[in-house]
Image (tube, rainbow, N blue to C red):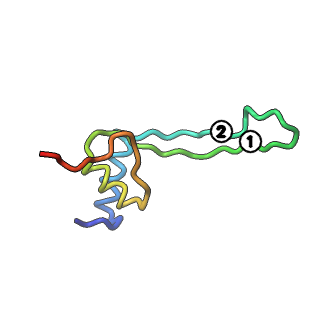
Amino acid sequence: MDLELSPKNLGWVAGILEGEGYFGITTRGARQKRAGSKIRNTIVVQVTMTDFDIMERLSAMCKSPLSGPYMAKASTK
């Protein structure tokens, strides 16, 4: 499997992000009322989907961790 970010693969990643992605900003520290506390903004790019093989490929291509509540389990059959 080709996991380098070639122009073709970059187009594939862009399609996944456009169709299944979320882009946002999280704010940390806004609820703290201590003097001198800093509010930090963090950019978030998130993809949620049930196709584990697609998520594995996306994770490998973007060199980003894969996490979620529904990680693959070994078959017990």
Amino acid beneath label 1: Ile
**Residue 1 location (% of width, % of height):** 22, 65
Q: In the drawing, does residue 14 fall left or right of residue 32?
A: left
Task: Say if 57 sits above or below 27 in the image.
Answer: below
Q: Classify residue 50 by image quadrant.
A: top left
Which tag, 2 or 1, sits closer to the chain's start?
2
Which label was assigned to residue 39? Answer: 1
* Quarter holding residue 63: bottom left
In this view, 52 is above or below 7? above
Query: Residue at point 40% right, 41% down?
Result: 21
**Residue assigned mark 2:** 27
- Tag 1, which secondary structure? loop
Dot 2 falls on a residue whose secondary structure is strand
User: Which sits in the foreground, 16 or 42?
Assistant: 42
Say if mark 2 contacts mark 1, CB within 8 Å: yes
On the image, the x and y values in percent for residue 74 come to 22, 50
Coordinates of residue 77 in the picture (x, y in percent): 11, 45
What residue appears at the point 61 percent right and 46 percent down from the top-left corner?
Answer: 42
Q: Which of 19/76 is in front?
A: 76
- Near mark 2 (Cα within 10 A), the count class, few <14, some 14-19 or many ≥20, is few
69 and 53: which is toward the camera: 69
Dot 1 alpha-carbon crowd within 10 angstroms: few under 14, some 14 to 19, many 20 or more: few
**Type of amino acid at the residue the image marks with label 2:** Thr
